[in-house]
Amino acid sequence: MQITGDKLIAAAPDVVWDALIDPEFLKTLIPGCESMKGSPAKGYDITVARKVGGMEARLSGRFDLTEVEPGRGCLLIGEGRGGAAGLAKGAARIRLDPADSGTKLSWDLTAELGGKLASMPNFLVEMAARKVADGFVERFAAAIENRPVQAKGWLGRLTGRS
């Protein structure tokens, strides 16, 4: 599975970078995140509980930052295991580029699933992964910009906040 995207954030690249490597800040933005500890130099340990296609999955894992260029980006490599639910592993190339009104945050994520997670239909897993990624980036941008989160998709059309 591969997911790519970008988002313009109204903040300087160094501000966006500092937020991207702050585990306490990130923990509040990751759906189902129960714990997250670590640093860019030593890596991060994380536990996340999520529901995907009616299946509960509690993944405990680790991710490390490599090819780190402070204020510009990195390669994030991680793996999580969820007992009977299976495992997820992947990598994400994160890029920060200065833009006229702030920073363009871009990502290119690849992931592999194993166990029961891998037996689910690909479209369902990819849809859930995109929802999590898009939701995280929207909450991340909103938190940095100190603004409310904008509803997306059908919820936004219902509420008039798309």
Image: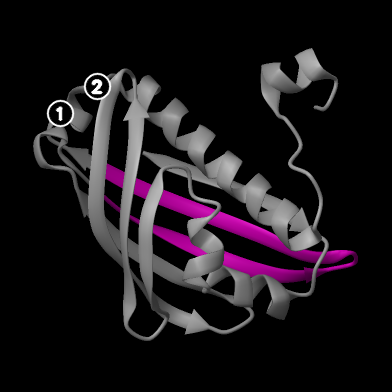
Q: Which mark is residue 104?
A: none
Q: Residues within 10 Å of mark 1 (few under 14, many from 20)?
A: some
Q: Main secondary structure of the magenta part?
A: strand
Q: Secondary structure at mark 2?
A: loop
Q: Identify the residue at the far right of this view.
A: 100
Quadrant of image for the N terminus: top left
Q: Identify the residue at the far front of this view.
A: 34
Q: Residue at x 47, y 69 (%)?
A: 23
Q: Residues within 10 Å of mark 2 (few under 14, many from 20)?
A: some
Find out whether residue 116 is within the magenta segment: no
Quadrant of image for the C terminus: top right
Residue type at mark 2: give it.
Met
| Magenta span | 89-112
Residue type at mark 1: give it.
Lys
In the depicted structure, whether residue 30 falls above or below residue 95 = above
Q: Residue at x 71, y 57 (%)?
A: 143
In the depicted structure, whether residue 65 falls above or below residue 63 = below
Q: Residue at x 74, y 52 (%)?
A: 142
Which colour assignment does the render follow? one colour
| Residue 57 % position (x, y) | 25, 35
Task: Find disc 1 in the rendering and name its residue.
Answer: 116
Disc 1 vs disc 2: Cβ atoms closer than 8 Å?
yes
| Residue 147 % position (x, y) | 81, 51
